[in-house]
Image (cartoon, helix red, strand yellow):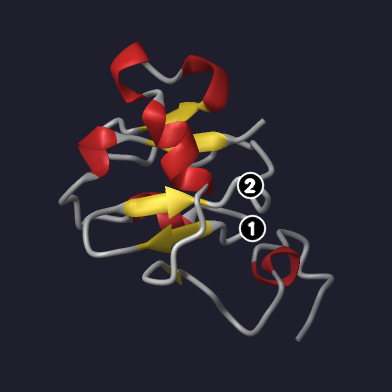
Amino acid sequence: MTMVVTEPCKGCKDKACLKVCPTDCFYEDGDMVYIHPDECIDCGACVPECPVEAIFHEDNVPEPWLHYIELNAKPRRSVRPLNRSRHTPCAVRCVTHVRKM
């Protein structure tokens, strides 16, 4: 299971959802961002951060936007990863600061 970005994201430039993702599974093209289903851990942290309410759990995507499940999973050359850092997500977000880089 995974989270899915849908139609309301088209043209949105806010990208607040990216900052809370512990796995950096967001990618973007010229229109919108997408969630890579193999990298998403289904934590749902991005859902309340999305200002246009475009992110849904795969099982709860509204009927008119079901094709976005496939769009998020479809590999595209024009899509580039976002919010990537040289540190692992667990090290970057470690609340106990046990992991040092």
Is 97 left or right of 80, judged from the image as shown? right
List x then y, in percent, for residue 83. 47, 70
Residue positioned 78% across, 62% down in the render: 96
Q: How many marks?
A: 2
Query: Amino acid under label 1?
Result: Thr
Q: Quadrant of the C terminus?
A: bottom right
Mark earlier in primary sequence (2, 1) = 1
Viewer-nearest residue: 76 or 55: 76
Residue positioned 33% across, 24% down in the render: 65
Label 1 crowd (10 A; few <14 / some 14-19 / many >=20): some
Label 2 crowd (10 A; few <14 / some 14-19 / many >=20): some
The image shows residue 23, relative to residue 8, as above or below, that is: below
- What is the C-alpha distance between the residues marked 2 and 1? 7 Å
Q: Is residue 47 among what the camera can see?
A: no
Residue positioned 32% across, 33% down in the render: 54
Q: Where, by quadrant of the figure, is residue 41 drawn?
A: top right
Q: Residue furthest right?
A: 98
List x then y, in percent, for residue 88. 71, 73
Residue positioned 43% across, 57% down in the render: 18
Identify residue for label 2: 40
Q: Looking at the image, is mark 2 or mark 1 nearer the viewer?
A: 2
Identify residue for label 1: 23
